[in-house]
Amino acid sequence: MMVRVKVRLVSLLREAVGGRRELELELESNSATLGDVLVKLFREYPRLKSLVEELEERGLAVLYTVNGRSASRDTMVSDGDEIAILPPASGG
């Protein structure tokens, strides 16, 4: 069974995928996790992977949500879910 998800990208993360706000991904598993989605996403968009890794190396948390709820890489995803990747909040 295929799992199709939408991935929304915000702010500077959008630039790493050619300015697109939303991507659709298909995973060939009915027991996919957010981590599986990220592996596929980062494989298809290496600039996005580099940017996320750079932010995390600088101690800035990139936030992930599934259907509007905070999520970790082991959060299960289902067909039709909407994932958002949010860059660290700026300010101070």
Image (spheres, rainbow, N blue to C red):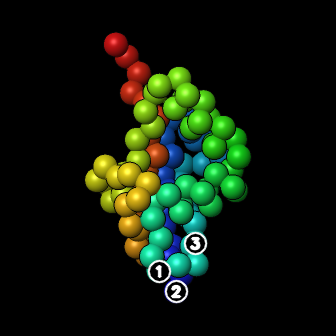
Residue at position x 45%, y 65% in the image: 33
The answer to whether residue 43 is left or right of residue 10 is right
Q: Closer to the camera, 54 or 21? A: 54
> Can you say which quadrant of the picture contains the C terminus?
top left
Badge 1 marks a residue whose secondary structure is loop
Q: How crowded is mark 1: few (under 14 residues within 10 Å), some or many (20 or more)?
A: some
In primary-sequence order, the first of circles 2 and 1 is 2
Q: Closer to the camera, 21 or 79? A: 79
**Residue 25 found in image quarter:** bottom right
In primary-sequence order, the first of circles 2 and 3 is 2
Vertical arrangement, residue 30 with respect to residue 82, above or below? below
Badge 3 marks a residue whose secondary structure is strand
Residue holding disc 3? 26
Residue at position x 49%, y 62% in the image: 6
Vertical arrangement, residue 59 with respect to residue 41, above or below? above
Residue 54 locus on image (x, y percent): 60, 30
Vertical arrangement, residue 6 with respect to residue 14, above or below? below
Label at residue 1: 2
Residue at position x 48%, y 67% in the image: 5
The answer to whether residue 52 is left or right of residue 90 is right
Residue at position x 47%, y 25% in the image: 59
Q: State yes or no: discs 2 and 1 in contact (Cβ < 8 Å).
A: yes
Q: What residue type is labelled 1?
A: Asn
Residue holding disc 1? 30
Q: Which amino acid does label 3 sit on?
A: Glu
The answer to whether residue 4 is left or right of residue 51 is left
* Mark 3 and mark 1: Cα distance apart in space: 11 Å
Residue 41 appears in the rendering: yes
Q: Residues within 10 Å of mark 2 (few under 14, many from 20)?
A: few
Residue 63 locus on image (x, y percent): 40, 41
